[in-house]
Amino acid sequence: MDLKKIAKEVIEFSGGQDNIQSATHCATRLRLELNDESSYDQKKLEDIEGVKGVFFTNGQLQLIFGSGLVQQVYAAYNEITGGETTGSQQEKQKPKGNIAQRFVKMLSDIFVPIIPAIVAGGLLMGINNVLTAKDIFAKGKTLLEIYPNIASLADLVNLLANAPFVFLPVLIGFSATKRFGGNPYLGAALGMIMVHPQLVNAYNEVAARAAGEIPVWNILGLTIEQIGYQGTVLPIIVMSFVLAVIEKYLRRVTPIYLDNLTTPLLSLFITGFLTFAVTGPLLRQAGNLLADGLSWLYYSLGFVGAGIFGLFYAPIVITGMHHSFIAIETTLIAESVASGLGGSFIFPIASMNNIAQAGAVFAVMFFIKDVKIKSLASASGVSAALGITEPAMFGVNLRLRYPFYGAIIGSALGSAWLGFNKVLAVALGAAGLPGFLSIRPAQWTSFLIGLIISFTVAFLVTAYFFKTKKELVDAK
């Protein structure tokens, strides 16, 4: 595979290098922001070797290459262009899409870079669950009780698993401040301040408050509680924005000979004070209310609510709005890490969606005649089962439409089953077959049944469409 040729064709069929403002990538997609959104040739882009799908959403031209290949194509693109963007500054700053689309893109820009750290912590947490859960390897015993000599290893795994969530504000502070145009290292420093050991650990706040052991600062007549923000999401995102705004303002008005000295000092001091005195407590409560609200809807509507969520999960993915769930999900999981109770209902439903997309695309592989689509379906089906659905969803199922219908029906029924059994995740990870590592071992059977329901229903509904819609068999 000639990666440079692929990159050159991407540039050419996207309207030329002068038409590309910027290029980024996520786990599976090359994302291009264009000056003229009408000048790309979708048919020629789809025919490029390695491209599994092309679509335009949220102001971006997105090309599905799949995990692994997208990084190589992106590297080849940067080698050709030197990593430079060519749109004018005015064009670059022009907002694209409506408010909701820009908000979702902002969340995506913040969370996509830190997902590897969160997923690594989540999978390690899954391993820790296996080590410490009873009845997996012996009735009434954990693996640690069977092999006490691995207790230190389990303790290390637990520490490694918890770290990305305990210090989540540091990760988000760096990524968010960079996204808002500020110095990312100041953002990381703000995150460190919010989880400083001197503060009452956020996970221990309830117990400390009940015992009357919340220390305070008395500053200018204000009583400010010394409570940390371990595992929180919303406060650090908003305060990273505030930090970036303050920093950029100070850089404009500060004499150049004082800039490097006073701008970081004042930016961090002002933002830190606002965080603890005003904004932080309000946003922490807002984040808790948002998570509680979604949880209330899920638990109140039961399997019906879960089924509706599962039905619309894939359409939400198409819009890119699923990235906004990460903020809620990390909050729910961070709370479960602290309490040992609860968890995320979003991750299991995402797993149902992914395995349903796999079921639908495998049905396409069995019934369609076109060799190219059959080959794409087999590869993307495995990818979807392992948690990466874009090649299957955009490259095959949406393209043929009816398999997509089969997939969302399968996802809805599998999700309804999970809702009925209250299956929750206690970690993030790969949503699909590997999702077992993120589910409490006691709920593995229910999770497995949900996967079987989603896959089987999606496969059978898609097969039914192939039997009744004869044009599908000959689709190209």
Image (spheres, grey):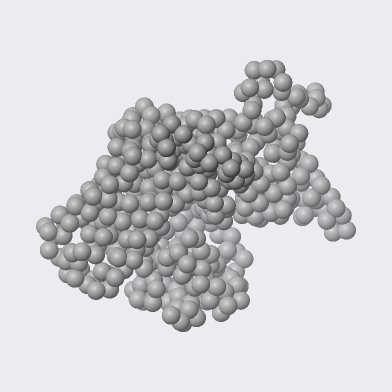
Residue in the image at 45% along x and 56% along y: 58
Residue 267 in the figure: left or right of residue 159: right
**What x and y, as percent, mark residue 460?**
19, 52
**Residue 43 drawn above or below residue 122:** below
Residue in the image at 80% along x and 45% along y: 266
Between 90 and 155, the one lying in front of the other is 155
**What x and y, as percent, mark residue 459?**
22, 54
Please give the count of numbered marks on the rendered protein.
0
For the question of whether residue 397 can be seen, the reply is yes
Residue 253 in the figure: left or right of residue 100: right
**Residue 289 drawn above or below residue 267:** above
For the question of whether residue 162 can be seen, the reply is no
Between 359 and 442, the one lying in front of the other is 442
In the picture, the quarter occupied by the C terminus is: bottom left
In the picture, the quarter occupied by the N terminus is: bottom left
Residue 466 in the figure: left or right of residue 375: left
State which quadrant residue 280 falls in.
top right
Residue in the image at 20% along x and 67% along y: 368
**What x and y, as percent, mark residue 328?**
50, 39
State which quadrant residue 193 falls in.
top right
Between 179 and 340, the one lying in front of the other is 340
Residue in the image at 39% along x and 73% along y: 50
**What x and y, as percent, mark residue 133?**
47, 36
